[in-house]
Image: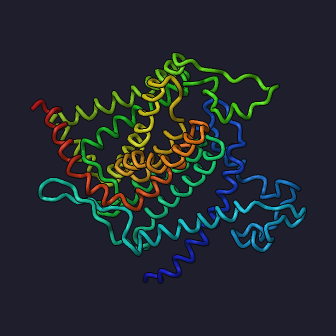
Amino acid sequence: MELPDAFYILFFFVLGSCVGSFLNVVVWRLPQVEFVEGEELFHGFWRGWKALSSPSSYCPKCENPLKWYDNLPVVGWIKLRGRCRFCKEPISARYPIIEAITGGLFVLYYVSFFMEGCGPCIRQMMPNGIPQYLSAAMLISDHWPIYALDMILVSALLAGSLIDAELFIIPLGIPWFVIPFALIEHAVWDRPGWPGALDPTAPAAALAAGAGVGLLISFILWWLGILPSSFADGGPMLEVEKAKLKPEDAPAKEYTPREVRAEMRKEILFLLPPLALGMAWLLATWKVPALSRQWQAVASIGWVGGLLGSVLGLLLGGFAVWFFRIAGSCGFGREAMGLGDVHLMAAVGAALGAGPATVAFFVAPFFGIGLSLYMWLLRKTREIPYGPYLSLATGFVMLFYCPIADYLSPGFTGLAEVLSQLLHGR
């Protein structure tokens, strides 16, 4: 029996507010954790978790531990009238605002997904071979896994955006917290014809499988020290970082355009195994009839298709940003985009799929153009944190991807046919 929507709205607002309370801790503590080279991705999660879980919440001014009832989302701050119980110093209104915003986002997506039918799509093939993307009538009792995954993604995007807006960094632990949930959810719960299900075609699944293996090889070679890290001694300092330097601080390392391009060649080297293996396996399963039939049977297995659809989204979401990072850095001779943006969009792709991640990347500049013009007119820094705009675009695409994809579908279907003819030598 379905409970009334009012119950779920109240429940998800409270749940979202509690998540927002935890995000306040993430935003405050995670950037303070110092990681050694390579640790953040492979070994730093334990240290990051310890920093978030211990010590318990305390006043940053008098350092007295807070009572549990003082930590109640939104209500605790109102009850204390915005002041510490012990030292009476003001508590920033940022904390209840983030809690209320997170609760509001949980409610917004519940109402959109389950009441308004505005959210994850169902893809169905039309007789003319063009896929059609339809909004779905979703039930929380059936489709709670995709809602849960999307709310994990929304929470991670909010935390990453708040940190990036202030410090111009996105801790890699945030997107890499999302990715395992995305891979598991799509492998275990995806069903053909369900909203949000990632069911790639056999060629797309082959590309994902080959490139995914190649990415693992690159990570292993990098971890063993065979593949070099770009900017191993620290990347170019941003203008905002240089402005904070004190006279007694060591001067910032300056990279010449030639040195920046040399660092980008290291990143290109990292990308060669996934690109080569992805194309090799795609061509093999396409050109060899016996292998093609076997691969289609494997790719049609439910959990395999869901997993490879998530992997494909991770790869294309991350690669779209990485391509522009490398191209922009080589073209301008200065670091164009941060690697944190690459990992952020990889997480978006793993959760939402290749199509939504790609659309979100190209929508993001429209969210950032206003601030860019403002900073240009006032002659302020040319650098802007891009994570918040990628996050805003992702939030937008989560709601409106269906009509966007339906509009673009005929053009991409025609492009796929042209590529198929080229690969088959016709």
Against 234, residue 282 (above or below) is below
In the shown orientation, is residue 423 left or right of residue 46?
Answer: left
Q: Say which quadrant the C terminus sits in.
A: top left
Please say whether residue 179 is visible from this viewpoint. Answer: no
Q: Residue furthest front?
A: 377
Looking at the picture, how far across and down is residue 196, in whole percent?
36, 59
Residue positioned 59% across, 44% down in the render: 173
In the shown orientation, is residue 257 left or right of residue 146?
Answer: right
Please say whether residue 197 is visible from this viewpoint. Answer: yes
Against 60, residue 70 (above or below) is below
Looking at the picture, how far across and down is residue 124, in whole percent?
23, 60
Q: Residue furthest top?
A: 258
Which residue is nearer to you in this view: 264 or 55? 264
Q: Quadrant of residue 31?
A: top right
Residue positioned 20% across, 51% down in the render: 410
Which residue is nearer to you in this view: 213 or 409? 409
Residue positioned 64% across, 23% down in the render: 233
Q: Residue furthest left?
A: 426
